[in-house]
Amino acid sequence: PYGRYSAPTGWGPLIDARLAWFLMESPNLWASMACLIIARQETTVRSAPNMVLLSMFIVHYLNRAIVFPLRMRASAPMPLSVMGLALLFCSVNGYLQARYLTHMHRYPSDWLQSLKFVAGATMWLHGFYLNNQADGILRNLRKANDTERYKIPRGGLFEFVSGANYCAEIYEWFGFAVACWSIPAATFAVFAFLNTAPRGAAHHKWYLEKFEDYPKGRKAVIPFVW
């Protein structure tokens, strides 16, 4: 329960949303840096495919932990307990992804030319773009001195689903999983779906109840399906 669902009771004290996003997402960056430093003598860190895949992970979280909070407009505070749970997950997941790519598996030198990497990296890049596009659309819904708090988002993936940002992030991490072709990355992609899809469905229900003119053809999270 954060953002439009945030409430002062039930989930403990509230924390500023910008600070919460930084604190809960940044462990992915610290874990990646720590694993890189510890593994500086490992052959994995001298593998271009390993470093490209880790860079994809880091780029996402540089955006999510630093750029995204800095660009946020006024947002409802987040329950400290929610932030804490997300921080715990990001600490564990960040370590698992970084540890695998810096210590546990060295990809062959031709991995960057493989069909799995090319297809997965293309999905990842497209998802990253769509995710940022959706964030921008939501950020620009309210103009200065606009008294109307909520509006119907339009453009990009929002033409197809109510949870465009969630759809894009799921797509992005499934692309990462294909590019890595590993159990840690696949597990993360599944968790990303299980974590964000219900919120996208809740958004869809909320929009339908709030706006009589909400586009009836839009799905919740998966275009044309659900």
Image (tube, rainbow, N blue to C red):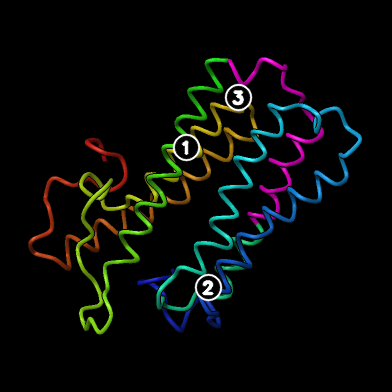
Amino acid type shown at disc 2 = Arg
Give coordinates of residue 113: x percent, y percent: 59, 16
Quarter of the image holding residue 5? bottom left
Asked if 142 appears above or below 152 in the picture, the reply is: below
Residue shown at 75% from the left, 51% from the top:
31
- Report helix, strand or loop for mark 1: helix
25 falls in the magenta region: no
Q: Please give left or right for residue 8 compared with residue 12 in the image.
A: left
Residue shown at 8% from the left, 61% from the top:
213
Q: In the rendered view of the protein, which quadrant contains the C terminus?
A: top left
State the CA–CA distance, disc 2 to disc 3: 33 Å
Where does label 1 land, which residue? 125
Quarter of the image holding residue 217? top left
Give coordinates of residue 47: x percent, y percent: 76, 26
State the CA–CA distance, disc 1 to disc 2: 25 Å
Where does label 2 land, which residue? 18
Instruction: Please report contact status of discs 3 and 1: CB closer than 8 Å, yes or no.
Output: no
Amino acid type shown at disc 3 = Trp
Instruction: Please report contact status of discs 2 and 3: CB closer than 8 Å, yes or no.
Output: no
110 falls in the magenta region: yes
Where does label 3 land, which residue? 181
Mark 2 surroundings within 10 Å by alpha-carbon count, few (fewer than 14), some (14 through 19), many (20 or more): many
Query: Magenta region: which residues?
Result: 89-113
Front disc: 3 or 1:
1
Residue shown at 59% from the left, 36% from the top:
187
Front disc: 1 or 2:
1
Q: Please give left or right for residue 138 compared with residue 178 in the image.
A: left
Give coordinates of residue 63: x percent, y percent: 54, 55
Quarter of the image holding residue 89? bottom right
Q: Earlier in the sequence, mark 3 or mark 1?
A: 1
State the CA–CA distance, disc 3 to disc 1: 16 Å
Amino acid type shown at disc 1 = Leu
